Image (tube, helix red, strand yellow):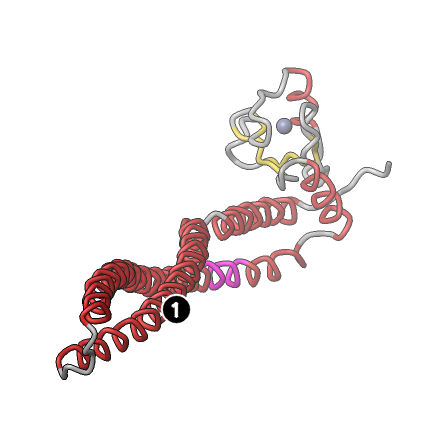
C-alpha cells in the first residue's frame, strides 16, 4: 500500500474533524436515548390498557342497561295484574267467596313477586351506577394520560430540535474542515473509524495513543521522531491514524 502523505496542517485538521465527528456521534446517541422516548412509550402502553378497560366498562354498562330494561319489562304485567285484581276486589265484582279468597291469595303472591322483581332491579341499578362511576374514573384517567402524552411529546420535540440545531452547526463545521484534508487520508480515516467505534484518528499525546490509550514503545517512538512531518503515522497497537501535536512528547 502506498504511504499516505499529508502536511502538518491537514493532519491537525483531521484531528479537528475527529473531534467534530465524536461530538456528532455523542449527540446522535443522546437523541436516541432521550428519557422522553421511554416516558412516551410507557404512557402509550398505559393509554392502550385504559382504552381496553373503557371498552369493557362500556360493554358492562350496556349489558346492565339491557338487564334493567328486562327487569322493568318483567315487572309491568305483574303490576298490571295486581292492579286489575285489586280493582275487582274493591268494587265487589267477585261475589263467590271461594273465588274471592283465591283472588286474595293471588294478590299476596303477586305482591311477593313484585317485591322480588324490584329487589332484583334495584340490584341491577346499583351495579349500573357502579359501572358508570368506574367509566367516569377511566375517562378521567385517559384524559390525564393524554395530557401527559402531549406534554412529553412537546418536551421530546423541543429536545430533538435543540439537538438537531447543535448537530446542524457541527455538520456545517464538518463541511468546512473536510476539504482541508486530502481525499486519500479522509478515506482512510473513514475506513478505520467504521471498525473502531467511529474513531479513525487519534492524537499522540505524552507518548500515548489517545485512541487506544496505550503508550508507544521506545522503538516506535524513535521511528515517529524520525518521521517526516508529512508522513501519516499509524498506531502500532490499534491501527488508528496517529497525529503529532506539540503535546506528543517526541
Ligand atoms: Zn492506538
Tell me the magenta residue range.
163-170
Q: Which of 222 and 119 lies nearest the eye of the viewer? A: 119
Q: Is residue 29 visible?
A: yes
48 left or right of 147 in image: right
Our reading of the magenta stretch's main secondary structure is helix
Q: Residue at 39% of width from left, 68% of height from top?
A: 66
Residue drawn at x 67%, y 27% is 238
SS at circle 1: helix
Q: Pinpoint residue 82: horizontal percent, then vertical percent.
A: 23, 73
Relative to 159, is 71 on the left or the right?
A: left
Q: Position of residue 3 (x, y in %)?
A: 81, 37
Q: At which x and y percent is residue 200?
A: 66, 39
Is residue 122 found left or right of 49 in the rendered image? left
The answer to whether residue 171 is above or below residue 201 is below
Which residue is more in the foreground, 65 or 27?
Answer: 65
Q: Is residue 137 visible?
A: no
Q: Quadrant of residue 81?
A: bottom left
Quarter placement of the N terminus: top right
Q: Would residue 94 be found to the left or right of residue 169 on screen?
A: left
Residue occupied by mark 1: 66
Depth order, front residue of 246/41 = 41
Label 1: how many Cα within 10 Å (few below 14, some 14–19, many 20+):
few
- How many numbered circles are shown? 1
Q: Quadrant of residue 149?
A: bottom left
Ligand 1 lies in which image quarter? top right
Residue at the limit of the structure toward the top, as seen here: 218
Q: Nearer the viewer, residue 33 or 137?
A: 137
Q: Is residue 77 above or below residue 135?
A: below
94 within the magenta span = no
The picture places residue 236, in percent across and down from the top left corner, at 70, 24
Amino acid at each position: 500500500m502506498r504511504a499516505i502523505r499529508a502536511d502538518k496542517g491537514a493532519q491537525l485538521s483531521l484531528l479537528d474533524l475527529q473531534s467534530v465527528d465524536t461530538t456528532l456521534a455523542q449527540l446522535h446517541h443522546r437523541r436516541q436515548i432521550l428519557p422522553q422516548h421511554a416516558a412516551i412509550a410507557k404512557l402509550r402502553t398505559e393509554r392502550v390498557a385504559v382504552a381496553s378497560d373503557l371498552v369493557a366498562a362500556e360493554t358492562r354498562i350496556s349489558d346492565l342497561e339491557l338487564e334493567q330494561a328486562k327487569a322493568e319489562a318483567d315487572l309491568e304485567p305483574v303490576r298490571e295484574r295486581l292492579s286489575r285484581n285489586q280493582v275487582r276486589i274493591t268494587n265487589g265484582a267477585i261475589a263467590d267467596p271461594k273465588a274471592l279468597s283465591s283472588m286474595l291469595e293471588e294478590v299476596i303472591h303477586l305482591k311477593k313477586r313484585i317485591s322480588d322483581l324490584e329487589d332484583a332491579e334495584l340490584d341491577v341499578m346499583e351495579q349500573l351506577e357502579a359501572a358508570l362511576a368506574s367509566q367516569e374514573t377511566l375517562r378521567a384517567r385517559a384524559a390525564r394520560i393524554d395530557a401527559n402524552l402531549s406534554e412529553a411529546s412537546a418536551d421530546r420535540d423541543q429536545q430533538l430540535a435543540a439537538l438537531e440545531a447543535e448537530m446542524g452547526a457541527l455538520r456545517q463545521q464538518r463541511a468546512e474542515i473536510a476539504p482541508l484534508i486530502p481525499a486519500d487520508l479522509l478515506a482512510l480515516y473513514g475506513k478505520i473509524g467504521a471498525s473502531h467505534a467511529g474513531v479513525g484518528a487519534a492524537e499522540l499525546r505524552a507518548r500515548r495513543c489517545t485512541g487506544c490509550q496505550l503508550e508507544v514503545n521506545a522503538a516506535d517512538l524513535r521511528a515517529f521522531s524520525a518521521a517526516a512531518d508529512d508522513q501519516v503515522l499509524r498506531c502500532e497497537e490499534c491501527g488508528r491514524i496517529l497525529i503529532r501535536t506539540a503535546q506528543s512528547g517526541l
